[in-house]
């Protein structure tokens, strides 16, 4: 796009921003939004997709304006936008818009800083962030910025989101294309069809437009699976274009997405690394089966290659050479997949391959959306008979044989017999993520004394050990205490001993002794004691007005036996009834048994659903209510 056209487009955004903010007075807007410190007046994106030199050229113009409504909103004088080597910044401008005596006054932003974008899961990436500091913030002031970028790769167009934590008066996406460019799109989370769509012709181009007015703020709710499950948004993509009388496919089905991905791995690990090959052969020399060999390689990588996420240009898509990962001793998810597949090939295992996948934060399937927006992760997989083992090196503690928790229920895309294949990743059943505990109890005055053994398997093993890490001494004791906490805040962890910390094939074990003060109630010649020292899911009730789905990281099964030694000269006066429940959400069984003066409470509880949707909320809450009713049951012991 010429500089003249850029200037005209920026001028258009400036004029439109002035007209939008001038449509209603500050007081009118403040009256409309009395509960907010700030609102977004306009958030718009415009794409211009043309063909130059037989290739696609994609220019994106962005416009944003937000009004400060209260003195508390003044502190939010910063805004930012992002770009990278693949989405290059071409120009920008920013200013504060004030209304003085009925006239608009612009104060240009002079404080601007480019910095590296920080993302919690990524150690380094090439994404830059332009921070803007707006001058003269006051109620009624409007922050306005415009910027223009060019997409170097037309496969990587952004989604547009019609929502924010603030109200939005106007939000719009506009796509202008040459007539020989074909696009398609998918709209998500708009059940009431609030997104207005139009397609018109203007100056020999197609103009597609999607717009929303008066968008309510998105409410943050703990346990939500991610904003893409909730907020209305659109993903559009270029299907094909015609150049030199030839139709060039871009995206639109899985085959084209797979072909796009293949170009990034077709030359991977072609040069042999003798040292890495020798290691692979050494690790597998005593292993008799293919699976034993892969497991040995998999555990070596998890133990010796540090996971550090890097995204730099196309390095966000292209795995690095296994040789480089081996010698550097660190890498991202793609690098982990690269070295696992390469070492497997060195060891003579042909059925290990690279695979693309999206984590659970992404709600799409390949059928929904066959674009790079569906994927943000890479793993290796082993074909085992007619099934697959998922080899994700990014999670240090997860054992061989189960996928990492954040890809459960997703789809994996890979090459098999030179064709693409999609395979579902299973949700690991609760029985694989078991917390088993045996607790022996005795009464001493108002204290409950206990010795216990806890065993944790699956994700309940790996996730706890990742949290504890290498902590030692007091910090470790506090972590273990929070893990085994029983009864109330008078719980005192006397001592503990751990086992199987490094062996991922065995349960993580904690043997411990504790005291629980002020837990026993003595009244006349009776003792009252509640044996439910752990009340699983007690606080899991969902709010009635909750909007977002609720997601658990993984399913869990609890199997606990509490064994209370009945004091001499005492007998049982009241024993609660046994309880059973089995529905779509839980399988629970609480049973009491008296044997040789030992009263045992056996608690078996298995969780069934990973993701709770709105229709699940009421029956889920009823399930929790039934559990809590039984948790409150108290045993009464009477002196003989």
Image (cartoon, rainbow, N blue to C red):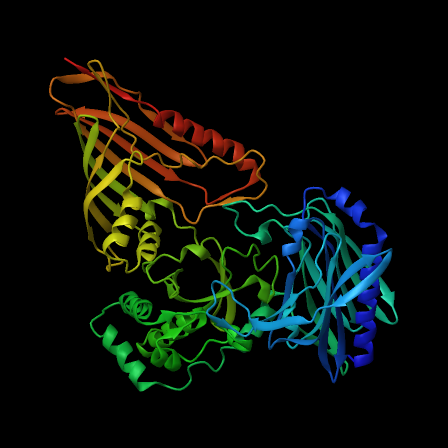
Residue 166 seen in this snapshot: no
Q: 492 above or below 366?
A: above
Left or right, 564 with respect to 577, comes to left
Residue 479: x, y in percent?
30, 50
Left or right, 85 with respect to 465, comes to right
Question: What residue lies at 41% left-to-right and 54% top-to-bottom?
Answer: 405
Front one among 404 and 75: 75
Q: 136 above or below 525?
A: below
**Residue 548, located in which quarter of the rendered image?**
top right
Quadrant of the snapshot with the C terminus: top left
Residue 176: x, y in percent?
79, 68
Left or right, 275 with respect to 173, comes to left
Q: 273 above or below 291?
A: below
Question: What residue lies at 85% left-to-right and 52% top-to-bottom?
Answer: 23
Q: 360 above or below 636?
A: below
Residue 120: x, y in percent?
48, 62
Question: What residue lies at 51% left-to-right and 61% top-to-bottom?
Answer: 358
**Residue 601, located in which quarter of the rendered image?**
top left
Front one among 90 and 243: 90
């Amino acid at each position: 796009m010429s500089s003249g056209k850029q200037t005209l487009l920026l001028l258009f955004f400036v004029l439109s921003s002035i007209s939008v903010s001038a449509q209603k007075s500050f007081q009118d807007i403040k009256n409309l939004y009395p509960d907010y410190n700030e609102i977004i007046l306009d958030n718009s994106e415009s794409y211009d997709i043309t063909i130059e030199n037989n290739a696609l050229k994609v220019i994106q113009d962005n416009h944003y304006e937000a009004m400060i409504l209260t003195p508390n909103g003044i502190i939010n004088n910063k805004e930012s936008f992002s770009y990278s080597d693949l989405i290059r910044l071409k120009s920008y401008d920013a200013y504060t818009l004030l209304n003085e005596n009925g006239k608009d006054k612009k104060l240009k932003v002079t404080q601007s800083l480019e910095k590296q974008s920080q993302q919690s899961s990524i150690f380094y990436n090439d994404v830059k962030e332009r921070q803007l500091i707006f001058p003269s913030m006051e109620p009624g002031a409007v922050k306005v910025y415009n910027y223009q970028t060019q997409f170097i790769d037309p496969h990587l167009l952004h989604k547009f989101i019609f929502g924010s934590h603030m109200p939005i008066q106007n939000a719009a996406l506009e796509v202008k294309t040459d007539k020989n460019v074909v696009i398609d799109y998918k709209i998500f989370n708009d059940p009431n069809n609030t997104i207005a769509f139009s397609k018109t012709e203007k100056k020999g181009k197609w103009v597609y437009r999607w717009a929303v007015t008066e968008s309510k703020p998105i409410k943050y709710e703990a346990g939500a699976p991610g904003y893409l499950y909730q907020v209305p948004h659109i993903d559009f993509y270029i299907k094909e274009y015609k150049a030199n009388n030839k139709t060039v496919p871009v995206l639109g089905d899985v085959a084209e997405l797979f072909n796009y991905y293949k170009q990034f791995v077709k030359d991977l690990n072609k040069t042999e690394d003798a040292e890495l090959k020798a290691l692979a052969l050494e690790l597998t020399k005593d292993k008799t089966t293919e699976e034993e060999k892969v497991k040995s390689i998999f555990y070596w990588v998890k133990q010796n290659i540090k996971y550090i996420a890097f995204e730099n240009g196309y390095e966000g898509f292209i795995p690095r050479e296994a040789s480089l990962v081996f010698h550097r001793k660190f890498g991202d998810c793609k690098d982990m997949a690269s070295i696992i597949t390469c070492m497997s090939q060195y060891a003579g295992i042909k059925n290990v391959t690279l695979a693309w996948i999206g984590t659970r934060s992404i709600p799409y399937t390949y059928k929904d959306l066959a674009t790079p927006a569906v994927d943000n992760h890479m793993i290796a997989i082993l074909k085992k008979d007619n099934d697959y083992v998922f080899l994700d090196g990014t999670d240090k503690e997860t054992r061989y044989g189960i996928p990492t928790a954040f890809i459960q229920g997703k789809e994996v895309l890979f090459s098999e017999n030179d064709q693409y294949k999609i395979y579902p990743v299973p949700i690991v059943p609760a029985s694989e993520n078991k917390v088993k505990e045996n607790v022996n109890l005795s009464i001493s005055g108002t204290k409950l004394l206990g010795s216990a053994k806890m065993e944790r398997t699956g994700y309940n093993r790996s996730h706890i050990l990742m949290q504890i890490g290498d902590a030692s001494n007091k910090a470790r004791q506090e972590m273990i205490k929070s893990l085994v906490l029983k009864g109330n805040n008078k719980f005192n962890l006397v001592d503990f001993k751990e086992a199987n910390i490094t062996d991922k094939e065995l349960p993580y074990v904690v043997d411990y002794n504790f005291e629980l003060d002020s837990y026993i109630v003595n009244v006349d010649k009776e003792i009252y004691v509640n044996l439910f020292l752990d009340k699983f899911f007690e606080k899991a009730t969902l709010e009635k007005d909750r909007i977002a789905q609720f997601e658990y990281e993984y399913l869990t099964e609890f199997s606990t036996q509490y064994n209370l030694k009945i004091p001499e000269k005492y007998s049982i006066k009241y024993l609660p009834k046994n309880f059973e429940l089995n529905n779509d959400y839980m399988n629970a069984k609480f049973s009491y048994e008296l044997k040789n003066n030992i009263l045992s409470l056996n608690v078996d509880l298995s969780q069934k659903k990973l993701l709770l949707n709105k229709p699940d909320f009421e029956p889920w809450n009823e399930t929790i209510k039934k559990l809590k009713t039984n948790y409150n049951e108290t045993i009464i012991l009477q002196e003989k």
